Image: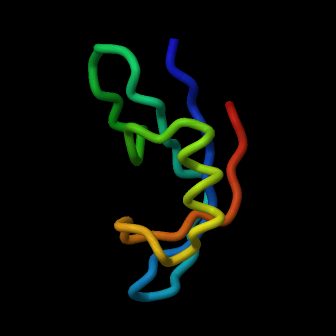
């Protein structure tokens, strides 16, 4: 069963912040959910992204997360 997380952060290009975006681990096959912002990030990936800040291949920076 995949885990879901709420993330907060900001867009790298505009520095505009966002909150309550849902990310989901992508370890199961199923229907895509329109409420999910990003697939394929588990807890370790989120921790690594927070540590890396803007030094990732993502268009956004994650500053905090929590499992939901």
Q: Residue at x 61, y 52 (%)?
A: 7
In the rendered image, the vertical position of residue 42 relative to residue 65, given as above or below: above
Q: Residue at x 52, y 43 (%)?
A: 22
Find the residue positioned furthest to the bottom: 14
Where is residue 64 shown, x and y percent of the image? Answer: 70, 58
> Which of the 4 quarters of the picture holds residue 3?
top right
Where is residue 32 shown, x and y percent of the image? Answer: 29, 27
Instruction: Report the colour scheme.
Output: rainbow
Q: Is residue 68 left or right of residue 62?
A: right
In the rendered image, the vertical position of residue 55 relative to residue 7, given as above or below: below
Q: Is residue 63 left or right of residue 40?
A: right
In the depicted view, which residue is nearer to us: 68 or 44?
44
In the depicted view, which residue is nearer to us: 39 or 55?
55
Check the picture and name the quadrant holding the C terminus.
Answer: top right
Q: Residue at x 47, y 30 (%)?
A: 25
In the rendered image, the vertical position of residue 30 relative to residue 5, given as above or below: above
Q: Residue at x 65, y 51 (%)?
A: 47
Where is residue 33 shown, x and y percent of the image? Answer: 35, 29
In the depicted view, which residue is nearer to us: 33 or 48?
48
Q: Is residue 36 left or right of residue 8?
A: left
Q: Is residue 38 left or right of residue 22?
A: left
Give the total of numbered labels: 0
């Amino acid at each position: 069963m995949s885990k879901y997380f709420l993330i907060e952060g900001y867009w790298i290009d505009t520095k505009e912040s966002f909150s309550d975006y849902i990310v989901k681990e992508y370890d199961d096959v199923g229907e895509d959910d329109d409420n999910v912002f990003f697939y394929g990030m588990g807890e370790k990936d989120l921790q690594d992204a927070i540590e890396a800040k803007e030094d990732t291949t993502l268009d956004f920076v994650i500053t905090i997360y929590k499992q939901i």
